[in-house]
Amino acid sequence: SNSTAARQQLFALEHGVCVSCGLDAHALWRRVKALTPPERYQVLLATPGFAPKGFKDRRLENCLEADFWQADHVLPVAEGGGCCSLDNFRTLCTPCHAKETAALRLRLKNRKNAEAAAGSGDIRDMFR
């Protein structure tokens, strides 16, 4: 798929290292996948942002590279960054990607609220 190809091309450039925090997420994935589930639990627990979600966390049995780093759009698709070149992609570890996604959702919510309120008056004017 296109996302797989973009991810492979991005890996060739950035090698799975998060551009935000500097974590070598590819190296972490390689280390974790070589461990037993109890060892994986301990390593993930000790890595900020990667704590397992209980003992049934899928990464303990079957960890995928996509669990550790993401090919993120610099200009998000929701903000016009859809069909784009590799220049609009960056490597983010999963915790940094989650932070960026939360910030995007907040921006989109605030924009939607501002658009809905556009043209409406200030309710405080009724009490002046």
Image (cartoon, grey):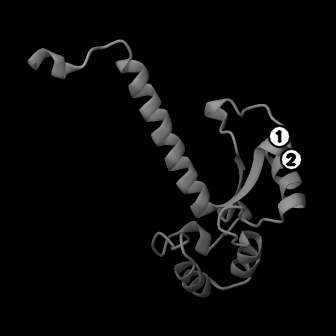
| Relative horizontal placement of residue 60, taking residue 23 as reference (left or right) | left
Question: Where does the image place residue 62, in percent across and percent down from the top left?
Answer: 66, 69
Q: Nearer the viewer, residue 75 or 2?
A: 75
Q: Nearer the viewer, residue 93 or 33?
A: 93
- The reply to whether residue 11 is visible in this rendering is yes
| Relative horizontal placement of residue 31, taking residue 21 as reference (left or right) | right
Quadrant that contains the N terminus? top right
Q: Residue furthest top?
A: 119
Q: Residue furthest front?
A: 128
Which element type, helix, strand or loop, lies under badge 2? helix
At a point 54% along the width and 75% down the height, the residue shown is 48
Do the CB atoms of the residues marked 1 and 2 lie less than 8 Å apart? yes
- The reply to whether residue 1 is visible in this rendering is no
Question: Where does the image place residue 107, in percent across and percent down from the top left?
Answer: 49, 38
Q: Up-down: is 36 above or below 69?
A: below
Crowd band around label 1 with a 10 angstrom C-alpha radius: few (<14), some (14–19), many (20+): few
At label 2, the amino acid type is: Ala
At label 1, the amino acid type is: Asn
Q: CA distance from mark 1 to mark 2?
A: 5 Å
Residue at label 2?
Answer: 5
Which element type, helix, strand or loop, lies under badge 1? helix
Question: Where does the image place residue 47, in percent across and percent down from the top left?
Answer: 57, 78
Q: Hey, which quadrant is residue 73 in on the image?
A: top right
Residue at label 1?
Answer: 2
